[in-house]
Image (tube, helix red, strand yellow):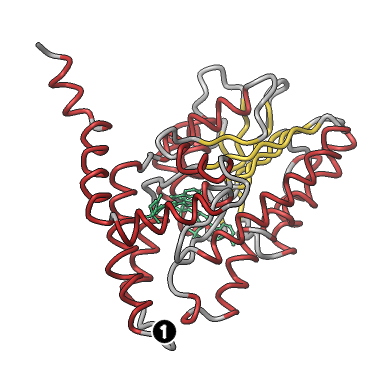
Amino acid sequence: MANSGQKVVLITGCSSGIGLRIAVTLAKDEKKRYHVIATMRDLKKKDKLLEAAGDAYGKTLMLLQLDVCSDDSVKECINNVKDRHIDILINNAGVGLLGPVESISIDEMKRVFDTNFFGVVRMIKEVMPDMKKRRSGHIVVMSSVMGLQGVVFNDVYTASKFAMEGFCESMAVQLMKFNIRLSMIEPGPVHTEFETKMMEDVAKMDFPGVDADTVRYFKDVYLPSSIDIFEAMGQTPEDIAKCTKKIIESERPRFRNLTNSLYTPIVALKYADETGGLSVNTFYNLLFNFGPLMHITMSILKCLTCSCLRRRTISP
Ligand SMILES: NC(=O)C1=CN([C@@H]2O[C@H](COP(=O)(O)OP(=O)(O)OC[C@H]3O[C@@H](n4cnc5c(N)ncnc54)[C@H](OP(=O)(O)O)[C@@H]3O)[C@@H](O)[C@H]2O)C=CC1
Ligand SMILES: CC1=C(/C=C/C(C)=C/C=C/C(C)=C/C=O)C(C)(C)CCC1
């Protein structure tokens, strides 16, 4: 039960990664400002969260089952919240999808949209009426740099995040009229199970219906470069949890929130050129013409951002 003055925060997708870390970070807030309702679709996966939450569990953190792809589960979950009163909704649940579209079924694509786009729509539809009645609330949506700019071979995942960005950009205007804030968070690569799940999926792929060149571009060009990017720029779930906490605590939260300054110039390419060609040509060149150079550049970037170098430069 939330104590008076505590804000009720409901977070989706807390069994691992960013959602788990946001739930624990808010539940362990030193001023105990939050009553965290951490949700997951399979409560058998709760151990990692409960271990990280420690003695906050049962005090500032509680657990509820929630599958954002099920209308009934969404309704049932919110009905289990006292007075259906949620101050902050954090839509974090999401799934990736990688590879040549020729070998991806429409059903698989629909599952990604059902989670990443319709999952957020279901939650907002369920929670928004109460926030409107109270003229108060904050809706946070975990988008991605791929909600701002496409990345090759991430076509459908990118589309699902673009869809969410467009939905939120439209919703934000009317929500403002009801004093409800809407914030999008756009992380670049983050080291979570998201990455391992994608690599596991790729290992199992046999690319039916895909020509040999496309398979080669995916496996021998894109994948090594994306591993470089993850290594050189990858943030931690803690980084994203800290950003999220800052956003929900700010008086006037920004609508869009990129979390990784190393990635900002890459997204900036898109806004620097209204013809849209700059980012397409840059990505093309980085991948197909400067692949090896990019590998070296990323390794240097990794050194510049890792602590060992900083330690050497700091100590005389
Ligand atoms: N990792 C990255 O590089 C980036 C991730 N993001 C976004 O961050 C969010 C969290 O991903 P991340 O923590 O990295 O990855 P994880 O795979 O670790 O976490 C994803 C979470 O979403 C849950 N989930 C999946 N489908 C559903 C569903 N139908 N209902 C409820 N929960 C569901 C998963 O639960 P289960 O354990 O049951 O599968 C899991 O808890 C996603 O929206 C992702 O798009 C954005 C930018 C970068
Ligand atoms: C930047 C960049 C690349 C890869 C970007 C990647 C891999 C981003 C991953 C983002 C994630 C995982 C977001 C999840 O929501 C390429 C295509 C290698 C080409 C060169 C520029």
Residue 299 picture location, percent across and down: 21, 43
| Quadrant showing the N terminus | top right
> Does the closest atom of ligand 2 sit within 8 Å of the Cβ of label 1?
no
Tell me where residue 233 appears, x and y as whole percent: 35, 41
Image-based side of 288 in relation to 250, left or right: left
Q: Is residue 1 visible?
A: no
The residue pinned by badge 1 equals 210
Residue located 45% across and 62% down the image: 152
Q: Quadrant of the C terminus?
A: top left
At x 44% / y 32%, what residue is drawn? 261
Res 69 visible: yes
**Nearest the camera: 50 or 316?**
316
Residue situated furthest left in the rendering: 316
x and y percent of residue 284 in the render?
41, 59
Q: Residue at x 58, y 66 (%)?
A: 112
Residue at the far bottom in the pictured view: 209
Q: Estimate the x, y position of residue 264 in percent, counting from the top left.
A: 47, 37
| Numbered-mark total | 1
Secondary structure of the residue carrying tag 1 is: loop
- Where 204 falls versus 121 (above or below)? below
Q: Viewer-proximal residue, 61 or 305? A: 305
From the viewer's perspective, tell me whether residue 151 is left or right of residue 84: left
Instruction: Residue lying at the far top in this picture: please name it.
Output: 316
Q: Which picture quadrant has residue 82?
A: top right
* Quarter of the figure with residue 76: bottom right
Q: Is residue 71 above or below residue 32?
A: below
Q: Residue at x 30, y 59 (%)?
A: 289
Residue type (three-letter) at the residue carrying disc 1: Val
* Closest to the observer, 314 or 137: 314
Badge 1: how crowded within 10 Å, few (<14), some, or many (20+)? few
